[in-house]
Amino acid sequence: MKKKSENNWLIILFFVVLSIIFIYPMLYVISVSLSFDGDIAKYGYQLIPKRFTFVAYSYIFQTPKALLQSYMVTIFVTVVGTTLSLILTSSIAYIMTRKDYRYSKITSYFIFFTLLFNAGLVPSYIITTTVLHIQDTIWALILPYGVSAWFTMLMKGFMDGLPFEIIESAKIDGSSELSTFVRIVLPLSKPALATVGLFYALAYWNDWWLAMLYIQNEKLIPLQYFLQRIMSNIEFLTKNMQAGISIDMSAIPAESSRMGIAILAAGPMLFAFPFFQKYLIKGLTVGAVKG
């Protein structure tokens, strides 16, 4: 019994040390974002800044209205996009698991085929702009990521583990296909939905590529693209200064602003992740075993 208790303490100590190792770089990022650029150049990255300052965040928040607007766009895209993607993904995964559906194997083949072959950027751009005509609208930030073949296969792997007898019993009791899916299958698939939903949310939250391709309206600029443009401006000014062009860089906290941008971009997702952790582990484990 004593030996077992000692082993438990060793395991706990191992994971505590592992957690500190993972948290350590994040603390460095926060520390650098609260430092003066001169101190960073002189002393390098330090866990505790020589002098605390919020000059980097003041520089980033020079246009608070635009930043807040980009946050609202990203939140809307993440919520609506994740919800729509979960509906489409779970629906496709469900029919792929139905053995009594005539085209389930063909559907699975087409989904799997897209994992191996991708048409590329040009066909995607043509469909978005000339077929769907959704460029410069909020849907250009949502629909291209509507269904992921990989997440669909992950969802299918989980739903394969659900007893088919439950669906047959629901059919005998007169339940329609839609009612069976909404009232029985989806509640039993909460771990998979939470797992896939988190992955979709991360994809929507971190995306700036679609905005660069399709968005011209300043009111539709998402957070990541807004921050990426700030980064590009800083890099442009830095390169011009190195090229000999006279630019006063003392008012531009280049290095600390980069870290501040990282905090603003990743912060909300870091707070959201613990709420999904329980379902994430279960969903990945069951999906991996059954898929």
Image (spheres, helix red, strand yellow):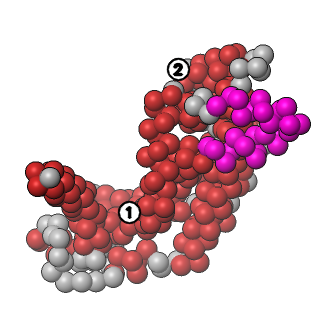
User: Residue 38: which quarter of the image?
Assistant: bottom left
The mark total stands at 2
| Front-most of residues 96 and 214 | 96
| Front-most of residues 181 and 210 | 181
Determine whether 129 is above or below 271 in the image.
Answer: above
Assign the magenta stretch its main secondary structure. Answer: helix
Question: Of helix, strand and loop, which one carries label 2?
Answer: helix
What type is the residue that disc 1 sits on?
Answer: Ala
Measured from the top left, where is residue 264 in percent x and y? 43, 68
61 left or right of 158? left
Determine whether 264 is above or below 128 in the image.
Answer: below
State the residue position of label 1: 262
**Residue bounds of the magenta highlight:** 163-189
Alpha-carbon distance for marks 1 and 2? Answer: 33 Å
Q: Residues within 10 Å of mark 2 (few under 14, many from 20)?
A: few
State the residue position of label 2: 116
What type is the residue that disc 2 sits on?
Answer: Leu
Question: Of helix, strand and loop, which one carries label 1?
Answer: helix
Task: Name which residue lies at 39% across and 77% down.
Answer: 57
